[in-house]
Amino acid sequence: MIRKIIKINEDKCNGCGLCANACHEGAIEIIDGKAKLVRENFCDGFGDCLPECPTGAISFEEREAPEYDEKAVLEAKERKKMDEMKHMHNGGGCPGSHIKQFHHNEDEPPASSVKPVSRLGQWPCQIKLVPTQAPFFEGAKLLIAADCTSYAYANMHEDFMKGKITVIGCPKLDAVDYTDKLTAIIRDNDIKSVTIVRMEVPCCGGLQMAAENALKESGKFIPWQVVTISTDGRILD
């Protein structure tokens, strides 16, 4: 039958997995780092995945496709629910939510006995709350950081936040594409540089992609870099 169904442009896909999470029917999977429509009969054609994609890789098309099979979807959801319960029991699940425990030497003294100082230069700092234009953005070095980085990386304030204006967010929890907001901040203010600090987990790719797209769409040539933090608090690159 001819019907509306999603189409995924793999060239634009960054493999963040947000579309797969948004697809309640389980029609999309991440395979070899790319989102793929693996079950056409599971796609209802409503497109819950479209607004979640930070790169605009998903669109609609009308073509020959199997009819939406609601019964099969419900059966698959029930199987998935049972599998998730087993995975949680065995420590499995989403790569970004795997259970880990880190054993640090609690008796080891900190590198410095000096009381830490906050380097947060403004308020608010959440990307969703911060205005697109503000005095603190003028001439600023902008830090775009994933929420978890400040907890995973012990010296976040001194190594990354000091001397910068910091905005933070989590594309998975906020369920939003930050591109437009970040584009306005970079375009409409005198931003001197951009540093992106993200976690190694796949969902943080949405934050990095939004920041990179914002830099491109701003029409400005600004020095920028990406730093990745491991889940146990190390700088990976």
Image: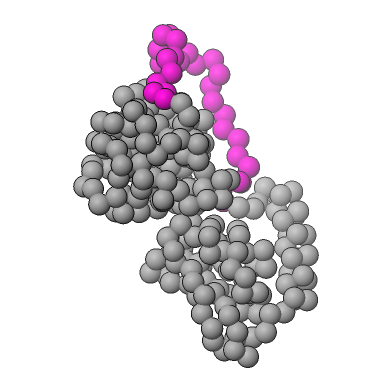
Magenta residue span: 95-122
Query: Quarter of the image holding residue 76?
Result: bottom right
Magenta region's main secondary structure?
A: loop
Quadrant of the image for the N terminus?
bottom right
| 68 to 235, vertically: above or below | below
Residue 103 falls inside the magenta stretch:
yes
Q: Position of residue 44 (x, y in %)?
A: 65, 74
Pick out the residue farthest to the left: 221
Q: Quadrant of residue 134?
A: top left
Question: Which image quadrant: the C terminus?
Answer: top left
Q: Nearer the viewer, residue 103 or 218?
A: 218
| Residue 225 visible in this rendered orientation of the protein | no
Relative to 120, is 219 on the left or the right?
left
Q: Is residue 50 at all visible to an observer of this figure?
A: yes
Residue 114 in the image: state x and y as whole percent: 41, 9
Q: Is residue 235 magenta?
A: no
